[in-house]
Structures are given as C-alpha cells and as structure tokens.
Amino acid sequence: MNTLIGYNRYLTLFLWLVALHSLAVGIGLIALSDAFLVRLGYAGSAERFFRTQGGVFHIAMALGYAMAASNLKRYACLLLFAVMVKSIATLFLFSYALFVKNLAVIWFSGMADFVMAMVICYLYRKAKFNPDGDA
C-alpha cells in the first residue's frame, strides 16, 4: 500500500472517531442529569440553556468532522479548521482549569483536545501530498 494513501486512511478513520467523540459529548451535555455533572465537580444549575447550547455546538462540529472525513480533498479546509478549533479548545480548557476551576475532567478534556489537534495536524501534513487526495 502506498504510504500516502495509508496516511489518508488513518486521517479519515481518526476524523470519524473525532466526530463520534464530539457527537457523544454533545448528546451528553444535552441529556446528562445535573446530578451526574455535580459528581464530576460542576455546580448544579436549574438553567439548562448553556449546556444545551454547548451540546448543539458539539453536534454541529461533529458534522464538520464527518464532512472532512467523507472527502479529504473536497473538504481540506475543514481539516485546518478542526486543528484550529481543537487548539482553541485546548487553550480555553487549560486556562479555565488554571484560573477559574481546577477540575480533573477539565484537564482531561484539554489533554484530549490537544492530542486530537496534534494527530489531525500530523496526519494532514503526511497525507496532504497524495495526488488523489481521497481516502
């Protein structure tokens, strides 16, 4: 197998996994009970708007990651967008954990977003020179 085509396949698979992760987080933010979130260290809130808004945002991002995975060449700009989104999320989460509320789940989320950004960036740099551009 051509190494470049292999990287395209790895990138496609990884983007589908990122999309599934984002979808799961989005559904979780919308559907999880306040009691469960309190056990994770978050303060309970009677107002669900911001959690639901965050959930919808994650679901929308999952669609973007899935579009990129479906056709790397056609949606190459979404690969760079994914790296930017995951990098911004990393900075936000680490800053929030440092300066606002030090929770293990926030540190873990920041590390997960950092790893996702780095893997997408690495695979994109390796795969983007494939003349076919498709997985």
Image: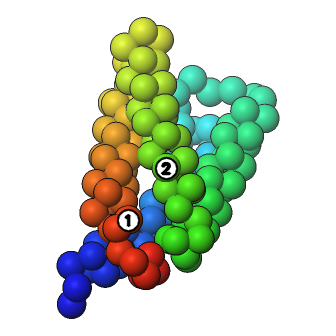
> 7 or 50: which is nearer to us?
7
Residue 117 picture location, percent across and down: 38, 46
Q: Residue at x 28, y 54 (%)?
A: 122
- Residue depicted at 73% across the width and 43% down the height: 52
Q: Secondary structure at mark 1?
A: loop
Pointer 2 residue: 80
Describe residue 11's horizontal placement relative to residue 34 as left or right: left
Q: CA distance from mark 1 to mark 2?
A: 11 Å
Do the numbered discs 1 and 2 sit on residues whose CB atoms are within 8 Å?
no
Q: Residues within 10 Å of mark 1 (few under 14, many from 20)?
A: some
Q: Position of residue 42 (x, y in %)?
A: 52, 27
Residue 95 image point, x, y percent: 42, 17
Residue bearing the label numbered 1 = 128
Residue sticking out furthest to the front: 131
The percent coordinates of residue 35 (x first, y second) are: 57, 38
| Residue 92 appears in the picture as rendered | yes
Q: Is residue 23 visible?
A: no
Of pointers 1 and 2, the one earlier in the residue sequence: 2
Q: Is residue 44 above or below residue 96?
A: below
- Crowdedness of circle 2 by 10 Å Cα count: few (<14), some, many (20+)? some
The residue at the point 58 percent across, 65 percent down is 75
